[in-house]
Image (cartoon, rainbow, N blue to C red):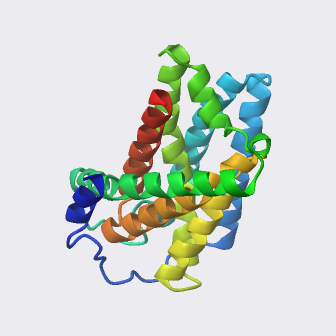
Amino acid sequence: MSLGVAALASKNFFIWPAPSGKTPLKLRQVLFGGALLVFSSLVALSVSSQTAELLSTMTGISLAFAFLFYLLFLPKDITRAILFSGERPVKTSWRALGSAIRMWIIIIPVTQLIGIMMSKFLTLVLPTQEIHTQEVTQEVQNSLPITGHYISMILNLGVLTPFGEEVFFRGILQTFLKNKMTRIAAVLCSSIIFSFIHIEHSLGSWVFVPVLFVFSLSAGFLYEKDRHILSPIALHGLFNLTSLLFLGIK
């Protein structure tokens, strides 16, 4: 049934406007954004004092504020290119939210199906003891029943992390790559990087690579379709919160 609803929601949806022109984004801005991504994690690690529960929240806070201030201090034309995919937005903020909800309806059953298939595959090819639970999965399960930490995770995964990651991977990286290659290739390359950067030390995290790749393709497409950074941010938040809900009820 959920796949049927997704198919219905996808009708006449996967259409995007003509490619935008070159943007003023330079390699140095991409490299600085990547450095901010790493620096935010290091700051969170030092502040959290090795406490896993605090580390996740501090990572989201440092990531969001780092990219917020980065946008504020960039030249206006570059900030505009990041926020609106190089040009003026195609949709208003409200319509961008609606577009994100529609994409969320489409990708959730697809990514859940991919996740189930990958889990089955890994259990067939790897010894059970080699497949460890992903850190965020363990963190969610440890925070149940609902506590203050669980609520902070909702804020972190639903707002802070989506803002920081989408500003970098879609707004900065994907927009820059469009200057060097076709729009489709830029979406593919940024999605590959996004997927593999989320791999953890556990083999169990490989389950999420194809899931995150499909999600990232969807976010990248949505960013180009609406030319509004709010679209992939909202989709990212909805995707994370849905995953959080599914982990909580397991």
Q: Is residue 67 left or right of residue 99?
A: right
* Frontmost residue, 23 versus 19: 19
33 vs 140: above or below: below
Residue 25 seen in this snapshot = no
* Frontmost residue, 28 versus 107: 107
141 vs 11: above or below: above
> Which quadrant of the figure has residue 3?
bottom left
55 vs 74: above or below: above
220 vs 250: above or below: below
**Image location of residue 134, percent across then percent down:** 67, 40
**Image location of residue 139, percent across then percent down:** 62, 28
> Which quadrant of the figure has residue 54?
top right
**Image location of residue 28, percent across then percent down:** 69, 67
Q: Is residue 61 left or right of residue 47?
A: left
> Which quadrant of the figure has residue 106?
bottom left
Q: Residue at x 37, y 54 (%)?
A: 109
* Frontmost residue, 55 versus 61: 55
Q: Residue at x 44, y 49 (%)?
A: 236
Q: Residue at x 50, y 58 (%)?
A: 114
Q: Residue at x 54, y 76 (%)?
A: 186
